C-alpha cells in the first residue's frame, strides 16, 4: 500500500514538473530565433522535455513495480 502511495506521489510530482516545463515562462525563453544542430530551439526544447518526462515516468513506474 505504501509503495502505491509513493508511486502516486511521484507521478503527481512529474505532472507538476510537466506543467512547469510546458508553461509560458519557460517556453518563452526558448522562443528565440536560435537553432540547435539546425533544429529551431523551441522544437528541440519541446521534444527534449517531452522525452525527459517519458523517461522519468518509465523509471518511476518500473522501479516501484
Image: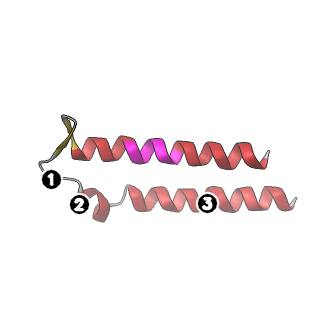
Residue at screen point 75% across, 61% down: 6
- Examine the rendered structure and indicate whether residue 18 appears above or below residue 39: below
* Helix, strand or loop at mark 2: helix
* Disc 1 crowd, CA 10 A, few/some/many (<14, 14-19, 20+): few
> Distance of mark 2 from mark 1, alpha carbons?
7 Å
Place of residue 11 in the rendered image (x, y in percent of width and height, measured from the top left): 63, 55
Q: Is residue 23 left or right of residue 55?
A: left
Quarter assignment of residue 27 = bottom left
Q: Which residue is mark 3?
A: 12
Residue 65 in picture, x, y percent from top left:
80, 44
Tag of residue 29? 2
Q: How is the image coloured?
A: secondary structure
Q: Are marks 2 and 1 in contact (CB under 8 Å)?
A: yes
Count up the numbered dots. Answer: 3
Residue behind mark 1? 32
Q: Secondary structure at mark 1?
A: loop
Q: Which segment did they paint magenta?
A: 48-53
Q: Which residue occupies the extreme top position in the image?
A: 38
Q: Residue at x 63, y 42 (%)?
A: 58
Amino acid at each position: 500500500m505504501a509503495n502505491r502511495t509513493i508511486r502516486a506521489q511521484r507521478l503527481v510530482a512529474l505532472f507538476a514538473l510537466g506543467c512547469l516545463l510546458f508553461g509560458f515562462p519557460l517556453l518563452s525563453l526558448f522562443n528565440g530565433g536560435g537553432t540547435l544542430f539546425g533544429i529551431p530551439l523551441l522544437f528541440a526544447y519541446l521534444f527534449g522535455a517531452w522525452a525527459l518526462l517519458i523517461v522519468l515516468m518509465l523509471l518511476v513506474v518500473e522501479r516501484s513495480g
